[in-house]
Image (cartoon, rainbow, N blue to C red):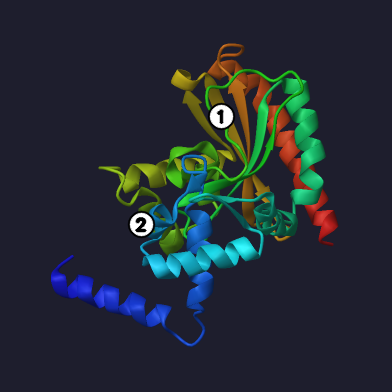
Amino acid sequence: MDKAGKAGDKKGRKQRDTGATFVRSVARALKVISCFGAESPSQTLSQVAAKTNLDRATARRVLLTLEKLQYLRHEGRQFSLTPLILELGFAYLSSLPFWSVANDVLRELADSLRVLCLIVTTDRGYDHVVVVSSIRPSNAPMFLNPPDVGQRTPTHTVAPGMVLLGGLIGVELNRALKASTAGRGNISIASLRERVIRDRSQGWSFRSVPEENFCEIAVPLLNGHGRIIASMSVLSPLSRISAEDAIKLHLPRVKQASEEINKLVALKNA
């Protein structure tokens, strides 16, 4: 993009950010909350200011406000999130149409197959998927990096991401593929589109990750109108079952579980 284009894009963002409906203080608070995570569970004022591109005075006001609201705690120079922050995430999770009906089905599937079961959804731009439910079997197999609730991953890199992309067509699909792969090397959009269409046609997606000892089968979860709203993903340890046998033995059970969840969701919303 040339300088004029960059300037125009920056000006456009600034105009949107300063519109009558934009509450800047809310945006800053959310930016501060989201800069904490597993890699930086506690941070100083200076670190927060640097991560959020806020000046120190603004960052300090936001941090102290969140502390007063009990979403942050302050020990010495370090700020960290409190458990109260979970209420914000649970408000979203509890609003999902399948949240209240899916866990029992997932738990039974996880225990019977001895697999890790996930429900994954995506953000509005489809550039990342987010784990919203993670059910481990009672006798849990070993995974090197088991996904946890809240974990974000580029959409095109995982099987449930391909399933979610399968709910899009035409311009929407092209836009989502570009968003998911932006800044991530030389990736063929055409090849990804072909895979999305193939997986959509067969009704499931598969990924094998030998270096992390698992393979993954993902199927769609639907709302009452038949639209894909999430993906159910099952991770099987390759040390216990081959990729070929996982597809042969686990896929029918995974499809059956997803159909059960879809029926329950339809009844819940009837």
> Depth check: 166 or 4 in front?
4
Mark drawn on residue 13: none
Q: Which residue is mark 1?
A: 216
Residue drawn at 54 percent across, 72 percent down: 26
> Depth check: 160 or 71 in front?
71
Q: Is residue 187 left or right of residue 103?
A: left
Residue 71 x, y percent position in the rendering: 63, 58
Residue 223 x, y percent position in the rendering: 71, 56
Secondary structure type for disc 2:
helix
At label 2, the amino acid type is: Ala
Q: Which residue is mark 2?
A: 50
Residue 100, compared with residue 22, is above or below; it is: above
Quadrant for residue 229, please give it.
Answer: bottom right
Residue drawn at 14 percent across, 71 percent down: 3
In the rendered image, the quadrant that contains the N terminus is bottom left
Residue 208, compared with residue 161, is above or below; it is: above
> Depth check: 2 or 52 in front?
52
At label 1, the amino acid type is: Glu
Residue drawn at 35 percent across, 75 percent down: 13
> Depth check: 252 or 47 in front?
47
Q: CA distance from mark 1 to mark 2?
A: 37 Å
Q: Is residue 150 left or right of residue 31?
A: right
Viewer-side label of 1, 2: 2
Residue 208 x, y percent position in the rendering: 49, 25
CB under 8 Å between discs 1 and 2: no
Q: Is residue 40 left or right of residue 86?
A: left
Residue 236, compared with residue 217, is above or below; it is: above
Residue 83 x, y percent position in the rendering: 68, 49
- For disc 2, the neighbor class at 10 Å (few under 14, some 14 to 19, many from 20) is few
Q: Is residue 227 left or right of residue 170?
A: right
